[in-house]
Image (cartoon, rainbow, N blue to C red):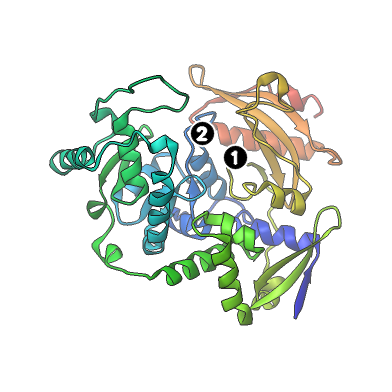
Amino acid sequence: MKMILSNKQMRHLWVAKNHLSKTPTGQFDLLDIIKKLGFVQLDTILNVSRAHHHILWSRNQNFRSHMLDDLLAERGKIFEHFTHDASILPVEFYPMWQKQFKRKKTNLSASNYYKSLPKPKERAQMKARIVDEGPLSTHAFDTKITGQKQMWARPPHKIALDYMWYIGELSTSHRHNFHKYYDLTERVIPQQILATKMDEISQINALCEHAFTRLGIATHKQIRDFWEACHIKEVKQWFETNSNNLIEVEWHGANGTLYQAFAHKNMINSLDAIPKPSSRMRILNPFDPMIRDRDRLKNIFGFEYKIEIFVPEKKRKYGYYVYPLFEADKFVGRIELKANRKSKTLNVVNFWEEAGIRWSINRYKKLESELQRFAAFAGLKTVDNLSLFTKNL
């Protein structure tokens, strides 16, 4: 059995799977959003709003930045660890994360970066301080880099805390001004969660199933890349084991190319239930899960995107921190924004209309309205330099 999807169906499906189909208002449940997405990537850059806050606000604009830290500090609802990057995950995923802890331990032990990892005795002394004093950040310790300073070099105490966090000995207790506080895992993760044991095969099955549910239609590689917590061979084995519940899919890309993938058999009966996306203009974060897989993004929407924060200024095609503009089921432009917190202003640095998209007066007005909402979310009072696009009004 094979299912064929039009490009419009694939667009609508992917928007729905990323929970961007509905207008981002109404009843708000932060934990539910995190569970539906599977994880929310954390990022240190504070351009207008931090990426994780922006991602959550895009799903429901009743979200406020303090709410994620509040939920983490509650303990027992979410935990912090590494998918493809540092992320927030629902705490019920913790049992299937044991393989990731072991995998990280193996990989880090072989890494040159961790050659200066303090010995077990020194790490035990650091943990003893946490036992006695409670959650501590890196600022509570004072060791120095020895020898020649290399790029990315870090003091031994930071390497040790990172290592113990990666392998699951320590967990993030809470964050204050984005500084991570480490505590013993058994004091962060509920005992009933820690007591839940899953063998390795069960963990792989859970990782694949949860990823597949959130992707809807996917290849082996896309399942693997969702968490980056298992190997491609393990994913292929999961597909073989579950082949009776899966069907082959062909879907039309933005340029007409037919792509091959897989879906659950019940997808056939749910295609008609895929909601039509809201026409709301959205300013998406560069780390938003809908655009994280750049190949999938290009294939579905015909939209090529690269964040250029690490590209030298003279070589950038667009700008330092450029936000994709999304409306209904298509990308309609890009906008470079920067917050001036002293003047409480959101500055429009640059603006680009996407090729082939006609910007009507209504579309410009929708962008202006969303900029005002985004500014308010970031604690800014005004939007400056609107003339970059309102000149066409």
Tell me if residue 218 comes above or below residue 309 in the rendering: below
Q: Amino acid at mark 1?
A: Asn
- Left or right: residue 181 versus residue 96 is left
Quadrant of the rendered structure where residue 102 is?
A: bottom left
Is residue 213 shown to the viewer in this render?
no
The residue that label 2 is drawn on is 49
- Location of the C terminus by quadrant is top right
Q: Please state which amino acid type lies under the numbered disc 2.
A: Ser
Q: Residues within 10 Å of mark 1 (few under 14, many from 20)?
A: many
State the residue position of label 1.
285
Under circle 2, the secondary element is loop
Q: Residue furthest left?
A: 132
The answer to whether the residues at label 1 and label 2 have Cβ atoms under 8 Å apart is yes
Indicate the position of residue 95 as horizontal and vertical percent values: 36, 64
> Sequence order check: which comes first, mark 1 or mark 2?
2
Closer to us: 226 or 69: 226
Helix, strand or loop at disc 1?
loop
Distance from the alpha carbon under mark 1 to that under mark 2: 9 Å
